[in-house]
Amino acid sequence: MKSFNTYTTESTPMLAPITLYEAKSEPGEYHNVGFTKNSIAPTQVGVPLDRDISAQSVFFGVKEWLYSQTKYDISDEQINYMLYLCGQVQSVKANSSIQLEAPPFNKQDTAKVAVNFGEVLAGIWACSNYPGGNGLANFPSKNNFPIGDIIIPLQRGGIELASVKSGGGSPTSFSGIWGMATENGLTKPYFKKRLKKEEREVIQIIDECIMGGKSSGRPESTWRTVKNHALYVAQWFYKNWNVDDGSNFGLPALARAIGTRPLNITDEYIENWMTNTMGDDPIAIKAALDPFYAAIGKSPSSDAWTRYHDPKHKQKSLKIQSPLSYHMVDWMNDLYAPAFSSLLSTFANVRQIDVELNSKGKLEVNIKPFTSMQFKFASFMTSNRSQNKIGFKKL
């Protein structure tokens, strides 16, 4: 496989515009390109999808997109830097780093390049450096492909799946890994009989509370919704563990505050209680919820209450769901993180590739198989309750 560095140096005249990157602006002078979430992920930037492709195919797809797109006000210097990254990432050895020129982007855009474009860089790196790879990679177009952000064809035949994490280690959704778990029988009774008690309980929590019964075979109309992850997990603990306010569990305190039974609490009930019972008064709502916050040891930020009526923060139930989600993640990690890691270690053909780029130009690539990694549960909580789910990340 020809090194991609040949396409990013002045020694290659046929691609003269893509020269070795040279900074033209002083630090701090870079304008805001305005990259948004996933805006420069592989599915958006000209990477050929759903077929085995070389590093060169990735590069030229990205190059064409960068020079032809009209959505972002990106300078030639910034374009050249992104292409420069495509070349330089191939020279990073596994589990090491190299020092490059600092990115010609402001802080916000640098973060987006690190996270979203990091997936593109991971694919290029995999073409050149993936252990046992055949010089190609496949970017699946749909996120529901089991855990694989990138599919790696192997020299010996067959494939391995790479889960890409870039720019700070945000959580991974269970949707991919649980598809694979279901296909491998992990949720079937005959398999669960061979597991430890904690491992069986982890499967039950993920399958019933987080995946909402999607692998159960029940009709879609009976599936649970993402926005209630924290409540589903809390109610599972309430039914299956001897928990009360004395152990800082919190659900009974919440039930008393909003006037219903613990197992009757839903996102819709919370919204109705805030709006109708409490008159949509943030001061009164906070006072009523203080015993709940004290029980779980977590609460919303102070500005969450001052912005209570901000049109951009319509999901009022987040005042409960968000702290409860982080509290449930703590419980799950205290009780089940080792069992969860043990379950994921069964996926021997999955590796995680971490691509990190910091504001000073340090480019780092790490790769590890799931069999040698430890994981923990993590919360996705955001201002959009469709994203209020619980996922996982590496320790």
Image (cartoon, rainbow, N blue to C red):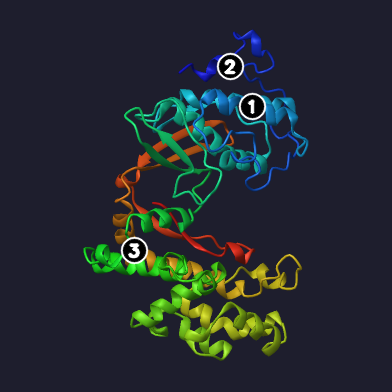
Q: Quadrant of the N terminus?
A: top left
Q: Give the residue type at disc 1.
A: Tyr
Secondary structure at badge 2 equals: helix
| Disc ID at residue 187 | 3
> How many dots with numbers?
3
Q: Mark 1 points at which residue?
A: 81
Vertical arrangement, residue 163 with respect to residue 61, above or below: below
Residue 57 location (% of width, % of height): 57, 26
Q: Is residue 26 visible?
A: no
Q: Residue at x 28, y 67 (%)?
A: 189
Identify residue type, mark 3.
Thr
204 and 254: which one is in front?
A: 204
> Which label belongs to residue 179?
none
Query: Is the residue under label 3 in contact with that under label 2 (CB below 8 Å)?
Result: no
**Who comes first in sequence, dot 1 or dot 2?**
2
* Position of 284 relative to 117 (above/below): below
Task: Please tell me whether mark 2 or mark 3 is closer to you in this view.
Answer: 3
Q: What element carries label 3?
A: loop
Q: Can residue 344 be seen in this view?
A: yes
Q: What residue type is labelled 2?
A: Tyr
Which numbered disc, 2 or 3, marks the residue that appears first in the sequence?
2
The 10 Å Cα crowd at callout 1, few under 14, some 14 to 19, many 20 or more, is many
The local secondary structure at tag 1 comes to helix
| Nearest-to-viewer mark from 1 and 2 | 2
Per the model, the C-alpha gap separating discs 2 and 3 is: 48 Å
Mark 3 or 1: in front is: 3
Q: Residue 7 carries which label?
A: 2
